[in-house]
Image (cartoon, rainbow, N blue to C red):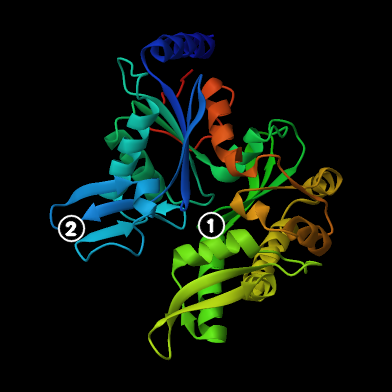
């Protein structure tokens, strides 16, 4: 009885506070950060990059503007990624970035109180890393912070039956990490986080071009080549693109032609490691849930889902159908929006938060 009254009171309080503050969902990624504002949808999709002036200690640019500065700044200005492999590497810069994004999301829609924020983070994140994310969001002005693991957020975002006693498997290939999770009864039954994702593929491409062509290219060029040419299976028609860099022999600028076969050879080993990680998750998942996954398939989300031929390659390697979501880039942030809309229903899915009162008998 007391618990029911407490829940009703909490629900009433949440509704009153919702009138006085905004609800914001954030997919805090290594490569890109997406921000959802309740009632307006996804309002921001910008690179997770901040340009810092080391002479003054001030933030020069955030997001797309900072990405344009990568590899083009003077010595006293540095463009950095404050989130590395899905976790905060620079607390102060991350706070500044979140403050900028939250402020931009609320521009023209500010309310009396700070916003309630839900943030997606990699699975297996430590309690120290959780605290860093929460503290960074609070420092950015958030009134209340909820943290949810990305495989769970993605499963909610693509409308899988997460509360039912049936297994659903999600592979989220992001910028810094790939999250592989099996969801059932409102929680993660089995999950693994591996540092094989978009940034690793970029590094593979840089290394391959250096070794094969003796040309040094930048990470931004590698990413452009990955987007244009990356594929897992051979194409009927050869696809190629130009890349410009520094010749390691002469030290002079040089332009070369890169084909889809070059990129396939560059990322092939990392793709194999990714497949092995997915196999290990299946091997350690309870057999009843594996049976459910065989029937329903594995759901692929994140930027890596756009690599040509990857779903078919995973299907063949795992022996399970692999389905790509219609909008794989926004699955996690869509999940955070659903959690914000009904926080009581998903309270068990979010990582324990100091903001919440624990009901007592």
Q: Is residue 246 visible?
A: yes
Q: Identify the residue position indicated by label 2 in the image.
A: 54
Indicate the secondary structure of the residue bearing disc 1: loop
Q: Residue at x 37, y 56 (%)?
A: 81
Q: Is residue 28 visible?
A: no
Q: Which mark is residue 177?
A: 1
| Residue 303 falls left or right of residue 22 | right
| Residue 355 falls left or right of residue 96 | right
| Residue 193 falls left or right of residue 20 | right
The percent coordinates of residue 299 (x first, y second) are 72, 46
The percent coordinates of residue 230 (x first, y second) are 65, 64
Residue 59 vs 206, above or below: the answer is: above
Q: Are marks 2 and 1 in contact (CB under 8 Å)?
A: no
| Residue neighbourhood size for the residue with mark 2, other residues' Cα within 10 Å, grouped as few (<14), some (14–19), many (≥20) | few
The percent coordinates of residue 95 (x first, y second) are 30, 42
Q: Earlier in the sequence, mark 2 or mark 1?
A: 2
The percent coordinates of residue 276 (x first, y second) are 69, 67
Q: Nearest the camera: 346 or 314?
A: 314
Q: Nearest the camera: 236 or 85?
A: 236
Q: Residue at x 57, y 39 (%)?
A: 332
Indicate the secondary structure of the residue bearing disc 2: loop
Residue 144's image quarter? top left
Please identify, in this view, whether the residue under mark 2 or under mark 1 is nearer the observer: 2
Residue 360 vs 204, above or below: the answer is: above
Q: Residue at x 61, y 39 (%)?
A: 331
Q: Nearest the camera: 351 or 19?
A: 19
Q: Nearest the camera: 92 or 166?
A: 92
Q: Residue at x 69, y 57 (%)?
A: 281
Residue 69 vs 9, above or below: the answer is: below
Extreme residue in the bottom direction: 249
């Amino acid at each position: 009885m007391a618990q029911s009254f407490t829940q009703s009171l909490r629900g009433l309080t949440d509704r009153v506070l919702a009138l006085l503050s905004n609800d914001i969902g954030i997919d805090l990624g290594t490569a890109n950060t997406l921000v959802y504002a309740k009632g307006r949808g996804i309002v921001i999709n910008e690179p997770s990059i901040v340009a810092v002036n080391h002479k003054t200690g001030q933030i020069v640019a955030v997001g797309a503007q900072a990405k344009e500065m990568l590899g083009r700044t003077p010595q006293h200005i540095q463009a950095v990624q404050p989130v590395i492999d899905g976790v905060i590497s620079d607390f102060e810069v991350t706070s500044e970035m979140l403050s900028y994004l939250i402020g931009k999301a609320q521009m023209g829609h500010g309310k009396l109180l700070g916003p309630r924020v839900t943030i997606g983070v990699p699975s297996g994140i430590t309690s120290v890393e959780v605290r860093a994310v929460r503290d960074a969001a609070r420092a950015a002005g958030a009134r209340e912070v909820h943290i949810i693991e990305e495989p769970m957020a993605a499963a909610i975002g693509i409308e899988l039956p997460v509360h039912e006693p049936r297994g659903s498997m999600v592979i989220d290939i992001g910028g810094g990490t790939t999250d592989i999770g099996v969801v059932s009864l409102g929680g993660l039954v089995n999950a693994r986080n591996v540092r094989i994702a978009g940034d690793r593929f970029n590094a593979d491409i840089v290394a391959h071009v250096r070794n094969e062509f003796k040309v040094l290219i930048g990470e931004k060029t590698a990413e452009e080549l990955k987007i244009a040419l990356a594929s897992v299976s051979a194409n009927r028609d050869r696809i190629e693109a130009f890349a410009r860099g520094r010749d390691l022999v002469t030290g002079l600028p040089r332009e070369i032609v890169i084909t889809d076969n070059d990129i396939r050879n560059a990322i092939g080993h990392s793709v194999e490691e990714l497949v092995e990680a997915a196999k290990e998750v299946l091997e350690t998942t309870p057999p009843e849930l594996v049976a459910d996954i065989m029937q329903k398939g594995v759901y692929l989300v994140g930027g890596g889902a756009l690599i040509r031929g990857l779903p078919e390659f995973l299907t063949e390697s795992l022996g399970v159908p692999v389905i790509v979501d219609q909008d794989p880039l926004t699955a996690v942030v869509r999940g955070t929006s659903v959690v914000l809309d009904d926080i009581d229903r998903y309270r068990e899915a979010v990582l324990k938060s100091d903001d919440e009162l624990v009901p007592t008998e």
